[in-house]
Image (spheres, rainbow, N blue to C red):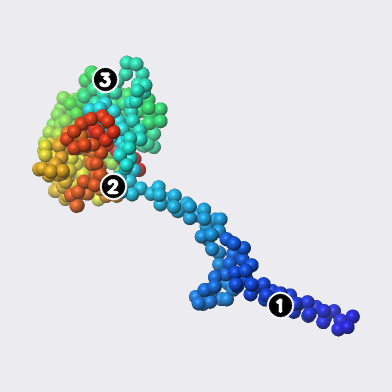
Amino acid sequence: MVGGPERWFMGAALGFMIVAAVVLLLATEGVLAPAGRLRLLPEAASRTKPAGALHIDAKHSRHGRERARQRKRTMASRPTGPLPGKLLIADKGNNRLIMVDAQHRIVWQFPRPGDLPAGQDFLIPDDAFLTPGDSTIIATEEDDHVIREIDIRSRRIVWQYGHPGIPGSAPGYLNGPDDAYRLPNGLTTTADIRNCRVLFIGHNGAIVRQYGQVGLCLHDPPRALTAPNGDTPLPDGGMLISEINGSWIDRLDAAGHLVWAFQSPVQYPSDPQLLPNGNVLVCDYSLPGRVVELDRRGSVIASFGAASGPNLLNHPSLAISLPNGLVALNDDWNHRVIIVDMHSQKILWQYGVTGYYGSGPGYLNTPDGIDFLP
């Protein structure tokens, strides 16, 4: 062989280099790049990227398309507007609980025909709160003197305390229970208004703990309370209590010791809620009523309510702060639930027709309690 193996090897290497150069040139023009896979950006050189550098076009790749779809689904499902979730409403005058979404649709209701066994009633629920885990609801039927727990999925009453229609103070009895909450430890609390006490009830019906005493209706928390109508649990294990007589709002710690107390500047304090900044949000259950934010000394930081017009509140009983900073409240005797901006003094969302009660879609009858489901 003329030239030997070395000449042949050099010739083959040169030929491979020429072929590689042609392939790279064609790829640069986008000829050989499979559609939707790898391709070279013609403008790469103008961005000082080395000529021929590879770029993954995620928009057109299978993985990129799926990620784009996921982003669209996330954006579509992200809550927007005044109500970033659902509201549970205790529709007292209609003897029902309903859950409504931001589009004013009823997405859950109790009881429906057939939910209650023969001989069982569900009457005048004045407050309802979701339990930890959001699988059940604790509802108080204040004027029927009973607390009931409803399973959301099955729409069945799974627990109760009190004797329907029979007030009392003996074990197993209540007299005007208000604001029942299920605590993370499994106990249920309630403000037993006419018995001047707040109870901690075990699932077996035993009273594990209490603030106040039957027959001792005066302001000396935790030893004595005067007509307590609010018993809001706090993140630190404590409690925020409102006492109707004297317009007191008290904060107790987890051990039941008094942290502070003040007389609120409202006529009838109802269901105080602790805000993240340490202030208190409370309703004045009056006409005209209002919702006020108070500091720990009872000074008014913000207020919503008017003597006339659309902002006139008629016996509002509970206001809660939503994650977006707005305030949702039930305006009981106006038969509506509204979401307001305390700063702009505007109503941004409403369920119910102001001043008119009813049971059809879009109507309420004396709504007396709400809770928020994200």
**Residue depicted at x 24% and y 32%:** 364
Gap between marks 1 and 3 measured at Cα: 94 Å
Residue 297: percent from left, percent from top: 15, 47
Q: Nearer the viewer, residue 34 or 162?
A: 34
Residue 213, quarter of picture:
top left
Sequence-wise, the earlier of marks 1 and 3 is: 1
User: Is residue 200 something one can see in this rendering?
Assistant: no
Tag 1 residue: 18
Is there a contact, CB below 8 Å, between mark 2 and mark 1?
no
Q: Residue at x 21, y 46 (%)?
A: 347
Mark 2 or mark 3, which has the lower sequence index? 2
- Residue positioned 57% across, 76% down in the render: 51
Horizontal and vertical percent for residue 345?
18, 49
1 vs 3, front mark? 1
What residue does disc 2 label?
82
- SS class, disc 2: loop
| Secondary structure beneath label 3 | loop
Q: Nearer the viewer, residue 182 or 46?
A: 46
Q: Position of residue 139 (x, y in %)?
A: 29, 29
Residue 146 location (% of width, % of height):
27, 24
Numbered mark located on residue 164 in the image:
3
Looking at the rendered structure, the kind of residue marked 3 is Pro
Task: Confirm or deny contact between disc 1 and disc 3 (CB under 8 A).
Answer: no
Mark 3 surroundings: few (<14), some (14-19) or many (≥20) residues within 10 A: many
On the image, which quarter does residue 235 sit in? Answer: top left
Q: Give, as a three-letter code, the residue at label 1.
A: Ile
* Extreme residue toward the right, this view: 1
Secondary structure at numbered mark 1: helix
Residue visible at 12% across and 33% down?
245
Q: Note whether 43 is above or below 121 in the view shown.
A: below
Return the disc, 2 or 1, that comes first in the chain's sequence.
Answer: 1
